[in-house]
Image: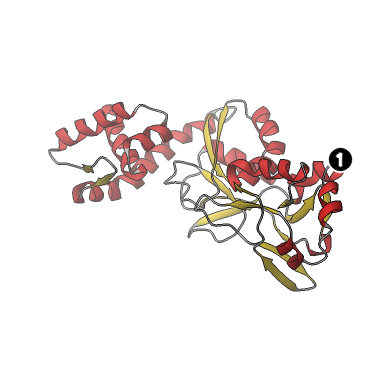
Amino acid sequence: MAMDDLNDLSAFAAVAQAGGFREAARLGRVSASSLSEAVRRLEARLGVRLLNRTTRSVAPTEAGARLLERLTPALGEVEAALDVVNSFRDRPVGTLRLNVPGAAAHLVLPSIVAPFLKAYPDIRLEVIVEDSFVDVLAAGCDAGIRYDERLEQDMIAVPIGPRVQRFATAASPEYLEVRGRPMHPRDLLGHACLRGQFASGAMPPWEFERDGEVVRVDPTGPLVVRLSGAADLAVSAAVAGLGIVYHFEEWLRPHLDSGALEPVLVPWWQSFPGPFLYYPGRRHLPAPLRAFVDFIKT
């Protein structure tokens, strides 16, 4: 097999798995036109159409689906074979792509990224921030970070970052002087609360726990922000006196320590397990990911 054939097969697999030329180009950092030309060459060489193209989507034909089924593990083996060369280097080389939620990007990675990249200067780290649970391989990533252990089959989970965290509620002293201090989570229904929502539009309830009693409330207020991209806006609004914010304690900690925000309902703050790095267990571990896993374990 010529290298050109391998490149064209890789281009077809990337487009089929990404569901489109643009997305595959974004993930692979190549042009969509080069991917389109590669797939066209492959189809001409094989004499069969591999992809059905519409203005909205790209999907494999029956022939394309059969080829992709056999091709995916084969390309994985080629990638693994090439990565073996890394073991003969003094330092691992390559790109590591992580898919992480906004909270992990803000609270977990800052203390890890700088020392890791200093220890492995030939590794390039790409961080994709996404709060929805995605298939890391289909998203073109090597590993992900998530806050629950409900992982897909054959995934390995490694603890990363703090092992216990808490959700905290806080407001500015000025707001509390005017509106009063809630003594029970249900009192929040009478307060201005600054809410967050997921990309799907769903707004998670505020959850509290004390002595085994769990209370969930859906308060309202003047501001709703997307959790992955605008969480700091809700915190700033709380500091400005617009209402009560509910967020990771570490995220609010600088404002709590400075006195800009005052904690409320502290006995009800709910603890939860820290995040995990997860990656496919049956797949060859690329050298950059292996280095990262070893780094966070130590």
**Residue plotted at (25% across, 50% down):** 65
Location of residue 94 in the rendering, given as x and y in whole percent from the top left corner: 51, 30
Residue 7 position in % (x across, y down): 31, 31
**Three-letter code, disc 1:** Ser
As drawn, which residue projects farthest toward the left? Answer: 47
Q: Residue furthest front?
A: 178
Please tell me which residue lies in front, 121 or 175: 175
Q: Is residue 124 left or right of residue 75?
A: right
User: Within 10 Å of the Cα at label 1, are there few (<14), some (14-19), or many (20+) other Cα atoms?
Assistant: few
Q: Secondary structure at mark 1?
A: helix
Residue 55 visible (yes or no): yes
Horizontally, residue 143 falls left or right of residue 167, namely left
Residue 118 quadrant: top right
Residue 108's x, y, as percent?
68, 43
| Location of residue 54 with respect to 90 vertically, above or below | below
Q: Is residue 61 left or right of residue 200?
A: left
- Comparing 47 with 25, the one in front is 25
Q: Which residue has dot 1 on it?
A: 258
- 217 above or below 45? below
User: What quarter of the picture does the N terminus occupy?
Assistant: top left
Is residue 295 in view? Answer: no
* Residue drawn where x is 61% and y is 39% of the image: 292
Rendered position, 125 above or below 19: above
Camera-nearest residue between 286 and 23: 23
User: How many numbered circles does the render carry?
Assistant: 1
Up/down of 258 relative to 121, above or below:
below
Which residue does the image show at 62% across and 25% down from the upper left?
A: 121
